[in-house]
Image: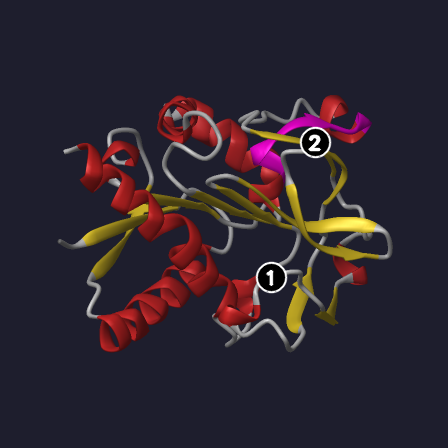
Amino acid sequence: MTTKIGIIAIQGNVEEHFRAFEKTLAEREVEQGEKGEVVKIKHSGIVGSCDAIVIPGGESTTIGRLMQREGISEEIKEAAGEAGEGTPIFGTCAGMVLLAKEGNEEVARTGQPLLGLMDVRVKRNAFGRQRESFEVPLKMSVSDDFGFDEPFPAVFIRAPALTHAADSVEVLATLNGRIVAARQGNLLALSFHPELTADRRIHHYFLETNFFKSLTKKASRN
């Protein structure tokens, strides 16, 4: 069976995620014989055919409004279901903002649309503006089975952070006391941009722990 990963392709780091997942899937096919494809989602009617969804970094207000206009937001909410049961969703930077149930005053002031899927509160631009972008070796609390014994080269660009997470949310990494990586069931949110590096550990982690586990669940129901 060929599996399908859908990248929200309205604005932002679409091509970078597309290439990163293509390479990750190619590596998995060589190592484990699992086939997959990556598609771009620009309008409604595609989300339901995907086995996993990626919301890339970019301008979160723009992405959120365009997703609403195109009817994509409602499709994602329906696909996500209850945390742990629905389609796996991976949000980076702007994607983290959109996954959150709550935002800070800037989110409210700008009328930022939220998908409201993850039990977290998000702060936009928590590490400053564009000129204050940086890269840092980040220690992640992830099983060494995925090679995270070594820090991840995390690229932060106008990055958000989580200021609160419910007990059901697993915190995977913090920086300066702020949550920058978290998971809740089938939802994975990062402040930073793994797609801008050659390191694909996080892409493999998402596929292994969420994506293919979800496929196994689907197969068991059929």
Q: How many marks?
A: 2
Residue 87 lies in quadrant: top left
Q: Secondary structure at mark 1?
A: loop
Q: Where residue 96 appears, x then y in whole percent?
A: 60, 42
Residue at 25% x, 36% y is: 46
Q: Nearer the viewer, residue 145 or 132?
A: 145
Q: Is residue 167 above or below residue 171?
A: above
Residue 33 lies in quadrant: bottom left
In the rendered image, residue 56 lying in the magenta stretch gets the answer no
Among the two numbered marks 2 and 1 on one chain, the one whose residue lies closer to the N terminus: 1
What amino acid is labelled 1 in the image?
Answer: Val
Seen as rendered, the residue at the extreme front is: 220
Observer able to see residue 16:
no
Residue receiving disc 2: 166
Residue receiving disc 1: 142
Number of residues whose C-alpha sits closer than 10 Å to that of mark 2, classed few (under 14), some (14–19) or many (20 or more): few
Residue at 78% x, 29% y is: 104
Residue 32 lies in quadrant: bottom left
Q: Is residue 14 above or below residue 152?
A: above
Q: Where residue 92 appears, x then y in whole percent?
A: 56, 50
What amino acid is labelled 2 in the image?
Answer: Ala
**Label 2 vs label 1: CA separation?**
19 Å
Number of residues whose C-alpha sits closer than 10 Å to that of mark 1, classed few (under 14), some (14–19) or many (20 or more): some
Relative to 179, 37 lies left or right: left
Q: Which residues are magenta?
A: 97-105
